[in-house]
Image (spheres, rainbow, N blue to C red):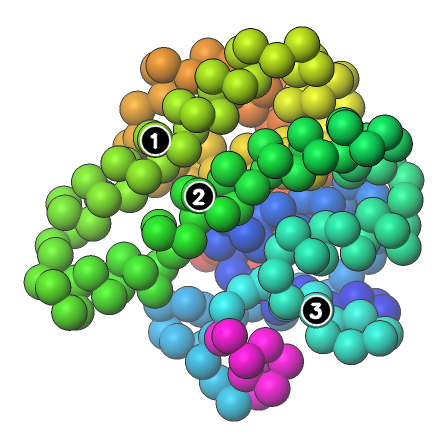
Amino acid sequence: MSDLVLHNYFRSSTSVRVRAALNLKGLAFDYVPLSLLQGEQASAAHLALNPSGLVPTLVTPQGALPQSLAILEWLDEVHPEPALLPDDPWGRARVRSLAQIIALDIHPVNNLRVLQHLETEFGVDAAGKAAWFRKWAGAGMQALETRLAAEPETGRFCHGDTVGMADLCLYAQVLNNARFEVDMSNCPTILRIHENCMATPALERAAPAHQPDAS
């Protein structure tokens, strides 16, 4: 049994971020699947670990740690190689800022519980939920594209030529966008970076299709 236990859902983009980081750092972890569609994240056992009733939750020797960005930063501090954040203060702030476009602007309004609430409380059908997702994902990705295309720090990846925290968020979000047919034709820089992420074995293994609960 590993010292790290990841409670997650194969299709969750926030879970993809953490799986990719664990793979990238070569860390063994036990995989605990939770079906969000069946409401397993709201079980008493999971709420004891994560009172928000969300995924992912990483159980560590020190305790349970929810919230994907906090998990990524903890992993980077405890297992610093390869680094997910640059050494310099500006670089670290820039990577966090890029990551937060996805983690704070796009993801919260497109979270599964928000989409379900639109359906149950306001009668929004599948087409309407997809349109909602595309609106907010499209707006956030366009802002991200504008920055990545213009800022000189962008390289093969979001910041230079190595995978970092922003890339993990970008990679997971583009995978999620495909499910909702988000038009990415106006985001060539993002698509280029995503292709480089897909060519990185540690990230590719984190994709939903490769997880034990995907079948």
Rounded to the nearest whole Å, what is the CA distance between mark 1 and mark 3?
Answer: 30 Å
Q: What residue appears at the point 88 percent right and 32 percent down from the top-left corner?
A: 87
Residue at the disc numbered 2: 105
Mark 1 lies on residue: 139
Residue 135: where, in percent of width, then height? Answer: 26, 36
Give the Cα separation between the discs numbered 1 and 2. 9 Å
On the image, the x and y values in percent for residue 16 come to: 58, 48
- Tell me how many marks there are: 3
Can the viewer see residue 38? yes
Magenta region, residue range: 45-53
Membership of 48 in magenta stretch: yes
**Is 116 left or right of 23, judged from the image as shown?**
left
Structural crowding at the residue carrying mark 1, measured as other residues with C-alpha within 10 Å and reported as few (<14), some (14–19) or many (≥20): few
Residue hosting label 3:
65
Find the residue positioned furthest to the front. Answer: 90
Q: Which mark is residue 158?
A: none
Packing grade of label 3 (10 A; few <14, some 14-19, many >=20) is some
Which residue sits at x=42%, y=67%? 36
Mark 1 / mark 3, whichever is N-terminal: 3
Are the residues at dot 1 and dot 2 in contact (C-beta closer than 8 Å)? yes
Dividing the picture into quarters, in which one does residue 168 lie?
top right
Report the residue at 77% width, 28% height from top. 90
Q: Position of residue 118 (x, y in %)?
A: 20, 61
Q: What residue type is labelled 2?
A: Asp
Label 3 SS: strand
